[in-house]
Image (cartoon, rainbow, N blue to C red):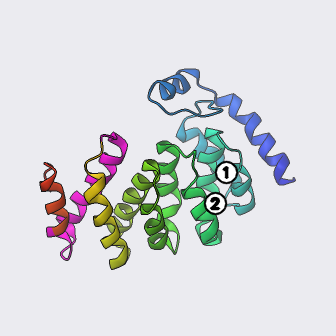
Amino acid sequence: METSEQVKQIKRSFRLFMNGVTAASMRSKGLNYKINWGVQLPDLKRMAAQYGHDAELASALWAENGVRECRLLATLIMPADQMSADEAIDWATSADITSEIMEMAVFNLFQHLPYADSLAHTMLDNDNMVIRAGAYHLVCRLLKRGCSVSAATIEKLLDVARIDIQTTDRQLLRALVSCLQYMASTDPTQAKTAATVLNDAGFDAF
């Protein structure tokens, strides 16, 4: 089946799992999409298992701008070893990306990319708070998995964090504080610096 036909078939199947209550709840929390069927993550994971890893299909689904379920499914079926750095940057720095899509992309895909460290560095340079929050989530996931994070990326993160920690945006603050607290409790080289950034802004380091 042609990829374009697969996308049409997938979008039709979303209607079978449509949940208006979930979609309305998301809207009330500020998660606005052009199209949102309210399909829950377990259902999307079952769909992803049916299609398996497919880079071409994942790219086509991601291209469905503003369609929540298409983008979530894309993060589940994109093979990390087949995604180019340029495409990863395009996904991670999409101007219309929501906090939900970003967090799922980090957890399902970005943390498994061989160049995740450099991707996080690029994301930290972005003016979009959702994208910077994604960078904090990404670095935290890499550290928790014992992956190497370059000194340049850690230094960049701490520099940006000193500014971002003054934000009133809850999503950004949650991601930032969580990352710094993990660094303060586990990273012997940056624990003191991370703790200082937190303490100076009135947050506990542990």
Instruction: Tell me where residue 57 appears, x and y as whole percent.
Output: 74, 55
Q: Which residue is mark 1?
A: 62
Secondary element under disc 2, as helix, strand or loop, is loop
Q: Of helix, strand and loop, which mostly describes the magenta segment?
A: helix
Q: Earlier in the sequence, mark 2 or mark 1?
A: 1
Q: Nearer the viewer, residue 33 or 41?
A: 33
Secondary element under disc 1, as helix, strand or loop, is helix
Q: Is residue 175 left or right of residue 79?
A: left
Q: Is residue 21 above or below residue 94?
A: above
Q: Is residue 36 left or right of residue 138?
A: right
Kind of residue at disc 2: Met
Say few, some or many: other residues with alpha carbon within 10 Å of mark 2 (under 14 / 14 to 19 / 20 or more): many
Q: Is residue 2 left or right of residue 98?
A: right
- Quadrant containing the C terminus in the rendered view: bottom left
Kind of residue at disc 1: Trp
Residue situated furthest right in the rendering? 1
On whether residue 149 falls in the magenta region, the answer is no
Is label 2 in contact with label 1 (beta carbons under 8 Å)?
yes
Q: Which residue is mark 2?
A: 78
Give the magenta-colored segment's residue range: 168-192
Query: Which numbered disc, 2 or 1, marks the residue closer to the eye?
Result: 1
Q: Is residue 178 left or right of residue 107?
A: left
Instruction: Tell me where residue 68 appears, x and y as whole percent.
Output: 61, 39
Residue at figure coordinates x 55%, y 32% from the top left = 32
Q: Nearer the viewer, residue 71 or 146?
A: 71
Instruction: Say whether residue 89 is visible.
Output: yes
Instruction: Tell me where residue 18 appears, x and y as whole percent.
Output: 63, 27
Q: Nearer the viewer, residue 174 or 121?
A: 121
Q: Is residue 111 above or below residue 24?
A: below
